[in-house]
Image (cartoon, rainbow, N blue to C red):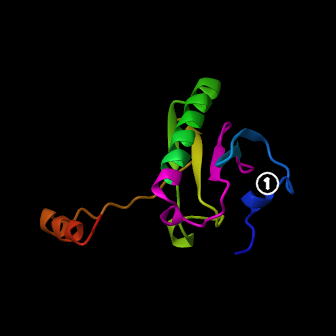
């Protein structure tokens, strides 16, 4: 696997505004800043998707993302907060390294999420649920 831009940030090959780091994760300001305070929380271990993480790694990633979200809330006082984790290009992932966006939100901030509802009947939902084996 080719090193991701995040791996290069972790190794300090690329500059970044780091908010937090420890032995398992790193959090830094998103260079794109959709709104002031937009932070990315990434695993230090480079894996492409959340499906490749051990449950303990995923739990830790989201625990730190929650901690960062609380700090962003305190610092920027947004009226909303979006935590977004995407996987693979068709799932809107743009960097092949698992991460969570901590995105402070404000009314009419221009950030959108298209989510066209399909509203299938309950019987179809039940059939879909039966296919999922946890």
Q: Nearer the viewer, residue 128 or 12?
A: 12
Image quadrant holding the N terminus, namely bottom right
Furthest-bottom residue in this view: 1
Is 54 part of what is drawn in magenta? yes
Identified at 16% across, 65% down, the residue is: 126
Is 48 part of what is drawn in magenta? yes
Tally the marks.
1
Q: Nearer the viewer, residue 4 or 83?
A: 4
- What stretch of residues is rendered in magenta? 29-57
Furthest-left residue in this view: 123
x, y (%) of residue 93? 58, 64
Q: Nearer the viewer, residue 73 or 79?
A: 73
x, y (%) of residue 44? 68, 54
**Is residue 92 shown left or right of residue 97?**
left
x, y (%) of residue 35? 65, 40
**Residue at the spot of label 1:** 9
Whether residue 109 is visible to the viewer of this picture, yes or no, is no
Whether residue 64 is visible to the viewer of this picture, yes or no, is yes
Image quadrant holding the C terminus, namely bottom left
Q: Classify mark 1: helix, strand or loop.
A: helix
**Is residue 29 shown left or right of residue 54?**
right
Identified at 57% across, 40% down, the residue is: 64
x, y (%) of residue 114? 45, 58
Answer few, some or many: residues within 10 Å of disc 1's Cα (few below 14, many 20 plus, some between 14 and 19): some
- 31 shown above or below 117: above
Q: Nearer the viewer, residue 4 or 22?
A: 22
Image quadrant of residue 3? bottom right
Identified at 65% across, 43% down, the residue is: 39
């Amino acid at each position: 696997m080719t090193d991701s831009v995040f791996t290069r940030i972790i190794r300090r090959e690329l500059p970044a505004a780091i908010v937090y780091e420890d032995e398992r994760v790193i959090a830094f300001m998103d260079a794109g800043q959709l709104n002031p305070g937009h932070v990315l929380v990434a695993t230090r271990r480079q894996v492409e998707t959340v499906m490749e993480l051990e449950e303990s790694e995923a739990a830790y990633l989201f625990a730190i993302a929650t901690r960062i979200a609380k700090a962003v809330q305190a610092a920027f006082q947004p009226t909303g907060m979006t935590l977004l984790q995407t996987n693979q290009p068709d799932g809107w992932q743009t960097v092949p390294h698992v991460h969570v966006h901590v995105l402070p939100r404000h009314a009419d901030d221009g950030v959108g999420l298209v989510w066209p509802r399909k509203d299938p009947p309950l019987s179809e939902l039940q059939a879909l649920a039966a296919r999922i084996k946890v």
